[in-house]
Structures are given as structure tokens and as C-alpha cells.
Amino acid sequence: MANAEHSGATEIQARLRVARLALWLVAAVLALREVAVVLSTPRGERLTDLETWVGPDGVLHVKGSLYDSTQFTGTPFGGLVLKPLTRAAEQALGWGWTFGTLLLVVALGLVAARALPQPVGRRTSLLAAPVAISLLMLSLPVRNTLYLGQTSIIPVLLVLVACFAVRGERVSGLLVGLAAALQPTVLLFAALLWFTGRRRGALTTVAAFAAGTALAWAALPHDSYTYWVHHIAGTGLGGPADDLANQSLHGLLLRLGVSGPLEISLFLALGAAVAALGVRRAVRYARDGQLLLAVAITGCAAIAVSPTTWQHQLLWVLLAVVGRVGKRASDRYVWPVAVIVVMTLPTTMLLPHISALYPLRNNLVLLAALAAATVIPFLSRTSPYYRTPIPAQSAPAAPARFRRVPLLPFLRRVLTRPNLLLELLLLRVTYAAYQQVRLAATGGSNSAGRATAEKHGQQVLDLERLLHIDIEHWANHAVVKVDWLRNFFDFYYESFHFVVPLSVLAVLYWRRPVDYRWARASLGFATLLALVGFWLYPLAPPRLMPALGVIDTVHGVQDFSKPDYGTLTALTNQYAAMPSLHFGWSLWCGVVIAVIAPRWWMKGLGLLHPLFTVSAIVATGNHWVLDAVGGAAVVAGGFGLSYLFQGPRGRMTAVVAEAEAEADQERAPARRDTAPRP
């Protein structure tokens, strides 16, 4: 038995080493990719901020004020620190700055990984550093900093080093004070130090900030007056304050149309409230032993109260990913996933292009920072749910026909309903990624790849003629002659592609959560396989083959040099026809309904949907018959991969029914006892 336990521990350690090596490899690849993107960009388009400051004609060379052009947004102390760089050779400075910034990011990830609240398991301690560095490399603030040549990583790193990597309050206060001299709102950390009992550090922070500012005032008096008095701590520098890139309360109020004295009053009042509440929450979590979370909350409050907070200064929000939220295990991933998605993807991918949602979409990062600073109920380490959330119930593995199925046994069939917010978030991000890949498959526009797509279209047509299934032209012209039939297929093609799958998912989520997980996984795998098809085989549908004579009943006659497909003209790839997801998704709906529906007439109605869909896509000229075959193939592959990875679903419904029956039996005596007696 001892040998078996030792063998198991050795196997676990080996797996951890492999996982750690793989994660470090991922971090290295991401780092090299970011460096390659920067250095491969033509001169004049990369490191633009750095060139504006220290280049041959940069503002640090100018005898007048640094802020005459409003292109330098740093403090006078920052300008004083950067001035020696004007003597460096341009190319050497660009390389040195890029790799130096990369090293700062790595250092930031290492310090953040060491700062995780204790106790930390062995697996977490081994994997935290590469995961942290990878997330930093993927984040928009770091990518923006590398591309522009900015200094915004330095204040964050100085604060983390002060809090977690050095000893002595005075040294910590000195580092935080230097960070505040570079980014004034970092002074908010002096309050965190003061109220957590590190008063000597707080006083040193204020003194270091004052000394750095005074030094800059002595060396650059005119610039200091311009920054601190004329621009009121940099307000208005770097572009219009109502620009979407300014994710602060000041920018939010201006974008909402508030201006003048009212805006200033609201900004000061809201800023004071956010700062006070944020520091109060940060102090509470610092005393709870979650100092990294306290630092993140304070940084998020600093983002909100700053007059201008540009994208490269938003790194504090990513640190808030360490907070734990939710009592249930299924809720535990909502907050970290939301933070990572907001900090790594453009907001245009997260929310649809609807005017009513613009105020939310335009201020999404600010709202995340405000939520972290003031609202999100992070768990205390004393909470019983902090380390052991309520686990999700899983069904026992059902016997499979094949020996090695499931391949991923840890992907168990969970019985409870998944978190709705997380599902909606993942659904939106997945669909946005699907749109991007679908459009990029032929070069990023409808005109790109047209010759290749038409060549593939001719290949498909020749194969259909060989198989005697080339019915597209006949079906299209037959339907065009019957107005009501043409209108029906046009409506069906445009309306039911999204409505029916979303409705099926919604019903399953509410009524059959176990089957929802199975169906959702199968649909995801099918869509992923379809994206591979779009990428490898761009295909022109019959309506985009001019010589074929097929009438585009949905979009009308097209000018192929300037096609018009309505509002989706610039958003969809019209050559993503193989396989047909119109038919694929409808077939998925039909199969799911046929498998799950309790009555035969429901199953029949479900199977009518793919029948009507395949008729519509062929009759309207939007797909070839073989496109539907491709759609059926990827759906079969989706269900197959779900079975391969997770095993069969057959026993799932029975397990849930048994659990519900047992629960009803347990509740029955209680109902009898509480029933009114005659």
C-alpha cells in the first residue's frame, strides 16, 4: 500500500512538472509574439509615445514646455526621469525599451504570483507564475504599453514590490512615493498603508512624492506649473477627456453629456465616495490576509478617481482576478472569467452593436473597476466557503461501448444548472470569436479571396453534376415563380437561424440542465469544426456565382465589386459556405429535440426545422446541397466529440429523475405533517 501511495504521489508530481513546463512554454510564446508584433511594425507606427517624447524631434528636446503639444501625459517628474534617454540611439533605445518592458512584465507576474493569499496549495504555487505572466501578456494594457512604449507598468510594479518583496516600512513607502510621483493617483495607497497600521510607510510615501515633485518643480518650474496648476494634475492631456480610451469617472460623465460646473461637482463627489469606499474595503481585506486583493481594490479606485485613465494604465483591474466570489463551485469562475475577458478582449466583442448598449460598452472597463472597488462581495478567508465552496453534484459515469471513453473523465456530467451570467458571457465571447474567424478566413473582407472562393464553387458544382444532385438553379427558379413560397423561404432563412437554437438552449437550461450541458458542448464542437472548414475551404455560394444565373432572393441583385448584404455587409464572410451552419445548427436542434422530447409529435416538429432549413438555403441560392452535407458532418462530429470526451448521456436523465423522485419522497412526509387537519 505504501508503494502504491508513493507511486501515485510520484505520478502527480510528474503531471505537475509537465503542466508547469507547458504553461511556461505558453508564456514564452506569448512574450515572443508581443515582441515580434512590436519590432515587425514599421518605424513611425511602433513605440509612438516613446518617439514623441525622446525621438529626434520629441518633446523632451524642446526648449519650451513639455505640454505644449499635449502629447506628453506624464508628470514633470516622469519627464525629468526620461530626459537622459534622449541621448540614446533611436534603434538601440527601441530594442532596449521593448525588452526592458518585457522584463518588467515578467517581474510583475512573478511578484503577483508570490503575493497570493496563504495558504497556497503546491499545485497553485507551481502554476501561478506562468499563468500570471501569460494573462499579463494577453491583457490589453500590457499590449498597449508595449506597442506605444509607455511607462505605466512601472508604478504597478513599484507598488507590488513595496508591498510584497521588500522589508521595512520606509523602503516600502519610498517605492510607493516614487510610483505616485509618476502617477499621482497612486497616492491613494498612502491611505491603505496608514489604515493598515503601516503609518511610517504612509508618511514616507507622502514625503517621497513631495520630494520627487519638488525636485521636478526646481528643475522644470514652467512644466510643473503647467501640469499641476494649468492642467490640474494632467487633466486634458493626451487627447479629449471624453475619448473612449479615458476610462475614468471624469470621462464617463463627459460621455454622458454632463459638463461644466455640474460635471466637476459630480466628479469630485463621486470620486471622493469611490476613494473612501474603496480604501475602506481594501483595508478590510488587507487585515483579512488578502493584501494582493487589497492592492487591486485600491488600484481600481485610483483608476476611477483619476481625471484621465488611459488604456495602458488599467492594469490594476487584472489584479482583482485573485478575489473569490460566490458560495457555489459553479459561481466561483464568474468573476475571474469576467475580469480576464474584459481585460483581454475589445469591448466591441463583448456586447452587441446596439445603440442602447453603447453607454455600457463604452465604459465597460471602468464599470469593472468600480465594481471591484465598491460592490463585488469578495469572500473573507474566514468564510467556510473560501476554500471549500458548495460542490456541484455530478452523475456517476455511464458505461460506454468503447474502452477508453471518456477520454477526459474529469469532465463529469454535472447535475446542477450552470451559472447564467457565465453562460451568457461565454456565449457572447464565443460568438464574437466565431464572427472574427469567419470573416478572417478570406482575408478580412468580402472581396478578399473571391477568385479562390469561385474556383471552389465550380469544384462543388462539378461534383454535384457528377452525383446528379445539382438542383440549386432549378429549385431557385421554381420558388421565385411562387411569391408566397419565396417570401416564406426568405423569412425562414433570415429569422430562424438564431432564434431556434437559442430557444432550445434556453428551454434546456431552465427545464433540463443536465441535457443543456450535453447539447451545448455538442453545439460548440460542431461550430468549432465548421470554423476549420471556413478557414480551409472558402466557398462561393450559388448566388455569388454570376455565370450560374441563380437569383439572390434575400439580398437582391448584387454588384459583385460592391456587394450589399444589408447591415451585415462588413461583418460577415459571404464565402463561409462550407459547411452550412444554417443547416448544421438546425440539424442540431432537430436531433436534440428528437432525443429529449417526451412525445412523438414534438420529435416530429423538431425534425421539420432542418427540413425547412435545407429547403430554404437551397431555394434562396445561399448554399449548395453539399454544404448541407458538410453541415451534417460537423454536427455528427460535434456529438461524436462530446461522447468521446465526456462519455454517453444515456444515464443522465435517469439519474436526475431518480434524484427528483427521492427528493419528492423526502418532502412528502413533511407536507403531510404540515397539512391542515379537518
Image (cartoon, grey):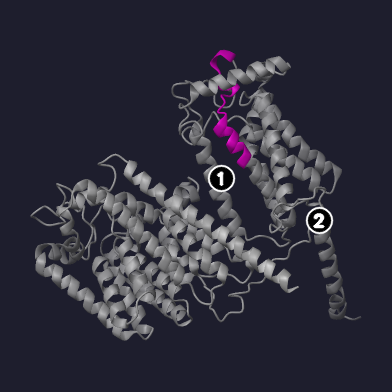
Q: Counting residues from the N terminus, which is met first, the one under dot 1 or under dot 2?
A: 2
Residue 359 position in % (x across, y down): 42, 54
Q: Nearer the viewer, mark 1 or mark 2?
A: 2
Residue furthest front as drawn: 3
| Snapshot quadrant of residue 43 | top left
Query: Residue 534: within the magenta?
Result: yes
Q: Are marks 1 and 2 in contact (CB under 8 Å)?
A: no
Question: From what the image shows, is residue 414 above or below residue 198?
Answer: above
Taking the image as shown, residue 316 lies to the left or right of residue 402, namely: left
Question: What residue is pinned by disc 2?
Answer: 398
Query: Residue 470: within the magenta?
Result: no
Which secondary structure dominates the residues rendered in magenta? helix
Residue at figure coordinates x 80%, y 43% from the top left: 594
- Image quadrant for the N terminus? bottom right
Pick the front one: 642 or 132: 132
- Image quadrant for the C terminus? bottom right
Q: Tell how many labels.
A: 2
Residue at figure coordinates x 21%, y 52% from the top left: 71
Question: What residue is pinned by disc 1?
Answer: 431
Residue 381 position in % (x across, y down): 54, 79
- Residues drawn in magenta: 528-548
Q: Secondary structure at mark 1?
A: helix
